[in-house]
């Protein structure tokens, strides 16, 4: 997902997208709805090309603030492991554009999981024009 963001970002004007929702506003900034939608589309494109063999792509899922002690709702892309049916959150919202998405069991994510730190300003990849 990070590679997709690094290639698409400069072309779409989202290469300066920063993690979270309220750290920056304006054109090119994504919230979790944008991130989960893009991630689901990227995964679906890989799946259409036969590049995802052990997982199934699902619709995005949301965790509710009613269960998160007053936190904002949050949304993520979701995949299911074919052999076990285990669901995983694939969440790129926690880091600036271009970093790998966080992949954690969906149930753990729904309980309020977040990474220990947010990764910032990746600039080590330049897409070919």
Image (spheres, rainbow, N blue to C red):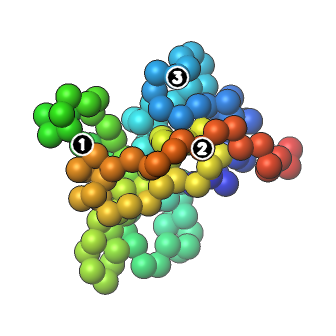
| Foreground label between 1 and 3 | 3
Outermost residue, right side? 129
Residue in the foreground of this view, choosing between 84 and 51: 84
Q: CA distance from mark 2 to mark 1?
A: 22 Å
Q: CA distance from mark 1 to mark 3?
A: 21 Å
If you read the primary sequence from the N terminus, does the residue marked by circle 3 or circle 2 appear first? 3
Q: Residue at x 61, y 25 (%)?
A: 28
If you read the primary sequence from the N terminus, does the residue marked by circle 1 or circle 3 appear first? 3
Look at the numbered discs 3 and 2 and tell me whether their residues touch, using CB distance below 8 Å.
Answer: no
Q: Kindly identify which numbered label has been placed on residue 87.
A: none
For label 3, the crowd category at 10 Å Cα-Cα, with few meaning under 14, some 14 to 19 and many 20 or more, is few
- Check disc 3 and report its element: helix, strand or loop: loop
Place of residue 11 in the rendered image (x, y in percent of width and height, measured from the top left): 73, 35
Residue 83 position by quadrant? bottom left
Place of residue 116 in the rendered image (x, y in percent of width and height, measured from the top left): 46, 48
Q: Kindly identify which numbered label has been placed on residue 119.
A: 2
Outermost residue, left side? 66
* Residue at the spot of label 1: 63
* Residue at the spot of label 3: 23
- Check disc 2 and report its element: helix, strand or loop: loop
| Foreground label between 2 and 1 | 2
Q: Residue at x 52, y 53 (%)?
A: 101
Quadrant of the frame with the N terminus: bottom right
Relative to residue 11, is residue 66 drawn left or right? Answer: left
For label 1, the crowd category at 10 Å Cα-Cα, with few meaning under 14, some 14 to 19 and many 20 or more, is some
Q: Residue at x 39, y 51 (%)?
A: 77
């Amino acid at each position: 997902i990070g590679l997709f963001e690094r290639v698409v970002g400069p072309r779409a004007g989202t290469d300066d997208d920063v993690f979270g929702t309220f750290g920056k506003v304006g054109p090119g900034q994504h919230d979790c709805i944008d991130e989960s939608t893009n991630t689901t589309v990227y995964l679906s494109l890989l799946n259409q090309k036969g590049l995802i063999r052990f997982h199934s792509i699902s619709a995005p899922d949301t965790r509710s603030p009613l269960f998160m002690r007053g936190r904002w709702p949050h949304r993520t892309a979701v995949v299911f492991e074919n052999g076990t049916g285990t669901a995983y959150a694939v969440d790129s919202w926690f880091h600036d554009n271009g970093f790998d998405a966080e992949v954690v069991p969906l149930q753990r994510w729904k309980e309020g999981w977040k990474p220990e730190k947010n990764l910032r300003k990746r600039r080590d990849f330049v897409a070919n024009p």
